[in-house]
Image (spheres, rainbow, N blue to C red):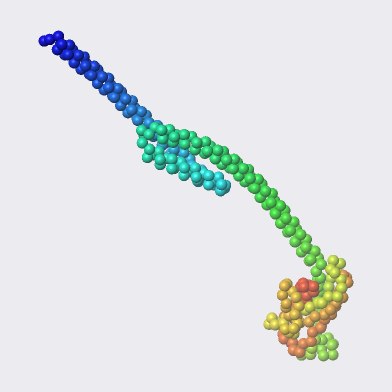
Amino acid sequence: MTEEKKNNNKLLWIILAVLLIALGALTYLYWNQHTELNELVEQMTIEKEELQEEYEDLAIQFDGYQNMDIRNDSLQDLLSREQQRVQDLLEELRQTKASNARRIAELKKELATVRAVMKDYVRQIDSLNATNQRLTVENQQVKAENQQVRSRNEELTQANTQLTETVTRAAMLEMTSCTLTTLNKRDKKTRMAGQIRKLQFDFVIAKNITCAPGMKNLYARITEPDGELLGEDNNLLFPFENQEIHYTLVQQIEYSGENYNGTCYWPIDEVEEGFYTIDFFCDGNLIGSFPFQLKK
């Protein structure tokens, strides 16, 4: 073998050795980078899962606040928009590959921003709740005070009503007695039923200084044993208890506040045996009711 050939073989082995070393180095670098890449992807997958859990927790928190009675339309709208934003970012995160480290990092920053916004909303909600609670307490106190005032007013109204009723009753006339005398056609007393032509009623109205003096109409209703009203006429009406009722006779008297003795008459053609009633009214009040009996 010539010297030149030996040198060529040695050069070839050197080149082969260099190539083998280079190939080994490249293989090692590839394996090392592949391993690092797998570890990075695995780490990013874990970070993505953790980030996804954080987004899901945040979405649950937003759901909780949406179910609250916030009573602030503007704040409610802001919460709704942020809640939708969290849902959109969560959906994007689910679709983002774990190898997309840049976008995952951006979504992580977005999460921090949303959390800061939510913290401010929570502060506003807490402030509103505290204000609502204070207003509720104040409202309850006002209601309690109003109820006390209403109760007091009702008591005063009742007392005034009772006082008014007392004063009204005190001002009412009262007929203390009424005596019946039966008369014949000559206005003489008679007990013979066949001769009775007139009924005479002698009455006494008690003294009452609280009643307004002056001229007054005294109405009388005479009821027969069968319940019919003597002398009933559609034109003979007077007011009593918010209605107009019939009367048998009316007599004008002048009342001065002292005892008043008066007499009224009623003509009668035929006596019906049984119990009668005469009721007296004055100033819209029933002031006396007296039964009497007629026999044949």
Q: Nearer the viewer, residue 44 or 190?
A: 44
In the picture, residue 157 is in which quadrant? bottom right
Q: Position of residue 284 (x, y in %)?
A: 77, 73
At x 29%, y 24%, the residue is 30
Q: Quadrant of residue 1?
A: top left
Question: How many numbered badges does the structure rendering display?
Answer: 0
**Quick one: 230 or 3, which is closer to the camera?**
3
Going 81% across and 70% down the picture, which residue do you hit? 173
**Can residue 292 be seen from the camera position used here?**
no
Residue 15, by quadrant, is top left
Against 16, residue 96 (above or below) is: below
Q: Is residue 187 left or right of residue 101?
A: right
From what the image shows, is residue 231 above or below residue 150?
A: below
View extreme (top): residue: 3
* 262 left or right, relative to 11: right
Q: Please state which of residues 170 and 193 is positioned toward the viewer in this rendering.
A: 170
Q: Is residue 164 visible?
A: yes
- Residue 261 is situated, as x and y percent measured from the top left of the image, at 86, 76
| Image height of 213 relative to 251, above or below | above
Residue sitting at 50 percent across and 45 percent down? Answer: 80
Residue located at (46% from left, 38% from top): 58
**Is 27 positioned to the left or the right of 293 in the image?**
left
Question: Where does the C terminus fall, quadrant-wise?
Answer: bottom right
Image spot of residue 44 (x, y percent): 38, 31
Vertical arrangement, residue 23 with respect to residue 217, above or below: above
